Amino acid sequence: MIISIITFIGLFYFSYRFRIKPFLTLLFASFLSGFFLNISIPETLYLIYKGFYSIVIVIGPIIIIGTLLGKFLNETGTSRKMVNTFISYLGINNIPISLNVIGFIISIPVFCDAAFILMSSIVKDLSKTTKKNIILLSICLAAGLYSAHVFVPPTPGPIAASAIMDADIGLLFFIGIIVGAIVSIAGYVWIRFLFKKEFEINTEEIKSYEFISNRSIISFLPIALPILLISSSTIIKFPDLEITQFQFLKIFVFIGKPEIALLIGFITTLIFLRKDKIKDTPLWAIKSLMDSFGILLITGSGGALGYIIRESGIINSLSINDVTGLSSILSVFIIAAIIKTIQGSSTVAIVTTCAITAPLIQSIGMTSELEKVILIISIGSGAMTISHINDSYFWVVSKYSNIEMNDVLKFFSTTTLIQGLFGLLTSITLYIFLT
């Protein structure tokens, strides 16, 4: 197993060095795995196809609808209304925490890179209005976006993880929301420590009515509604509650399926659609479909790698019975952190680590739905650690905020390290008290 991990890490390093697309790297890793495990080429190709298809058919609709929801949130101006609503209610002095929280919320349906680009103009406006350091505001937003990105479906990494690990996606969503929120706030606290007095804002020159005039509680409906539906469905299906016997609750189980809940959320974005923008909606839909295609390639390729490893029988020859419980949580964190730090993509780190871990579930004794979710949370924590110069998100934060690389390393990279370690600590705490 150690040799396999080293091989994957070396492959990812060269893929970063020579700028190879992540999905091609994963497919090549799948093919090499079949070759070195003495699987015939036709059988290897079949397993790659089967693994790719089995993942995409499950998560494809969720990713497509989630991407569509995120696109319409931005194009209808709903994201801006969310920001203004938070600021108007929490107060101008609390703009940094407002950005952190709104970043976490918006990143649930939107890829963190895209979400930061969409929000960057808002951050610049706020920096100019409040006379506050752009670094402070940008990193607060980036930390919030990053937390949902690695913990909460339907972002690609978590949703692929649930499929590869055969974990309950509703339970992952429910726990991912809680853990992600905690990790997001941990990042905010670290940033507050770094900037100290710069959190004080002079409100005398700021016209607060500018935020109040464009606020709307209803703007949160497209995201709040799916969260409530998916969480309700998860609670209803929880075995110990024994409430699935009530027939009328089955409708909530159905509409609480992630793809149905997100579709309902998407439909609610149409409330904010202006008549003069209706003609643009086909272009928005086409753009979101193009964006989702790249995500599906990565997650499907990760599924192919996992299928090769699972079907090869190599796991049965490994002596890993002593890696259980807390040791397994720490191990998957380290694997994900190494892959993330070397090749840069959190999604690839999550997908690859899950592909390596999934065949080991029985051996390490993490078989319950809750235990599998905790493993995924630990993997997500490792996949945050750390974002630096080989991560596209790092450069998005830098370029779209006009922040120098050294400052991004000092403030954002250290924040992702703190967040990742805090996520690991939360995973360990959940395992100790809930299993």
Image (spheres, grey):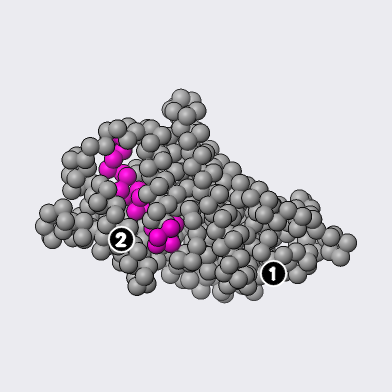
Looking at the rendered structure, the secondary structure element under dot 1 is helix
Looking at the rendered structure, the secondary structure element under dot 2 is helix
Residue beneath disc 2: 10
At x 59%, y 61%, the residue is 410
- Say if mark 1 contacts mark 2, CB within 8 Å: no
Vertical comparison of 433 with 405: above or below: above
Residue type at numbered disc 1: Lys
At x 43%, y 62%, the residue is 344
Q: Quadrant of residue 76?
A: bottom right
Q: Nearer the viewer, residue 242 or 26?
A: 26
Q: Is residue 138 left or right of residue 419?
A: right
Q: Quadrant of the C terminus?
A: top left
At x 51%, y 48%, the residue is 420
- Ranked by sequence position, the earlier of labels 1 and 2 is 2
- Residue 95: where, in percent of width, then height? 73, 56
- Residue 425: where, in percent of width, then height? 51, 39
Residue type at numbered disc 2: Gly
Q: Which mark is residue 35?
A: none
Boundaries of the magenta span:
341-364
Question: From the viewer's perspective, is the residue at label 1 or at label 2 nearer?
Answer: 2
Magenta part, dominant SS: helix
Q: Nearer the viewer, residue 287 or 348?
A: 348
At x 29%, y 54%, the residue is 6
Vertical comparison of 155 with 239: above or below: below
- Residue 217: where, in percent of width, then height? 71, 52
Please tell me whether residue 347 belongs to the stretch shown in magenta.
Answer: yes
* Residue 148 visible at all: no
Q: Is residue 204 left or right of residue 401?
A: right
* Residue 335 visible at all: yes
Q: Is residue 325 left or right of residue 217?
A: left
Residue beneath disc 1: 124
